[in-house]
Amino acid sequence: MGKKFSKNQLVIICCLMVALIISLYTIILFYPQNNKHNYLTVTIKPGFSLSKISDLLYQKNIITNKHMFELAALAMGKEKEFPIGTFHIINASSNYEIINQLVNESPEVVKVRILEGWNNRQIAGYLSDIMDFDSTEVIKLAHDKNFIVENDLEVKSLEGYFFPDTYLFFKGETPANVLSHLVKQHKMFWNRTYEIRAKQINLSKHEVVTLASIIEGEAIFNNERPKISAVYHNRLNIDMKLQADPTIQYIINDPPRRLLNKDLKIKSPYNTYLNKGLPPGPINSPGKQSLLAALFPEENDFLFFVARGDGYHTFSTNKRDHDKAKRKFQKIRRKVKRENRKK
């Protein structure tokens, strides 16, 4: 028969076992990782496993023993609690300090401001600068059929569907997550009232966004947007070419510049000087005010408008008055050009 332990002996054995467990727990948690940096940033991306995180920390010389780090994360029950984002590791040399900072500290936040009228190329370049994205990946996603379907849209491109606004994203977010959020904000614009209104004016939602993008490219001041919208609605109603300069700017792939006559002859479905009706899709990301203007144009008979040099436009109902307004603007332009030469 085996040796029987007395009650006191069992208590001592249990205490020793508890002490051993606590000691092992303490050793694992406070194992010195010899972090060689007082301050370092770490980016945890979606899908990172505990093993992947320990590999990352090892590569950055934050930890020297991956196995001990993983044991510590398991002992603390934090192996599945590492959030995505970019974190700052500050004066952390033990497993406990490193894990605590990664799990409990807020990740770095980036303020992202998408401006009205930006097209996909401009948005991609901006996100490349501020979020460290690969701009080619952003463009690729904007045209990826599967990604578009995942965002519940039936369009060929996400041009026009990245809603202009100011956002806060965790540094380290993926391009897909960020772009999906921009699309989600656009979709939030469409309440039942606006959907009904689109049907009343015989336009699909995609056509409304397309028209709004042209208005966005033309207007500077909000109070002019409904009037500019009316011009395009009036032209559509009589099957007159829109002749919208922003659609030409979209196809020349150059920074905004004064258009030449040869530009107006470029063969493209987006050339509204050659083709009647709306172009196939948006040419930029319209903001709320342009979307509302597309849905609720001012009631007027204007068919023409031309810049007058102060951000506003002169509107006309006939070609004769329009040509007169154009000559007036050209005089202003020549005068400004002469004055600039004198400086």
Image (cartoon, helix red, strand yellow):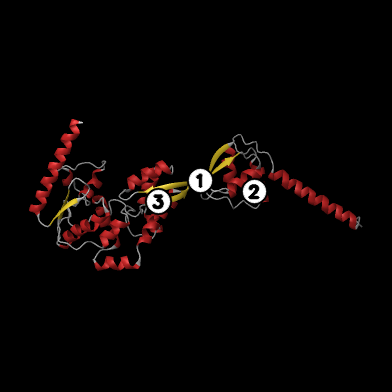
Q: Please tell me whether residue 229 is drawn above or below residue 132 in the rendered image.
A: below
Which of the numbered marks, if any, corresponds to residue 73? 2
Instruction: Classify the position of the N terminus by image quarter.
Output: bottom right
Could you say where residue 67 lies in the image, as x and y percent from the top left? 65, 43
- Residue 225 picture quarter: bottom left
Q: Is residue 42 above or below residue 212?
A: above
- Between tags 1 and 2, which lies in front? 1
Q: Which mark is residue 166?
A: 3
The answer for how far apart the CA atoms under marks 2 and 3 are is 36 Å
- Farthest residue to the left: give it: 320
User: 289 or 67, which lies in front?
Assistant: 289
Query: In the displayed structure, would residue 328 be above or below residue 228?
Result: above
In screen coordinates, is 236 left or right of 165? left
Is 248 situated left or right of 106 in this image? left
Question: Which of the two discs, 2 and 3, sits closer to the camera?
Answer: 3
Disc 1: which residue: 108
- Which element carries disc 3, helix, strand or loop? strand
User: Circle 2: is it few (<14), some (14-19), or many (20+) Cα within 10 Å?
Assistant: many
Q: Tag 2's secondary structure?
A: helix
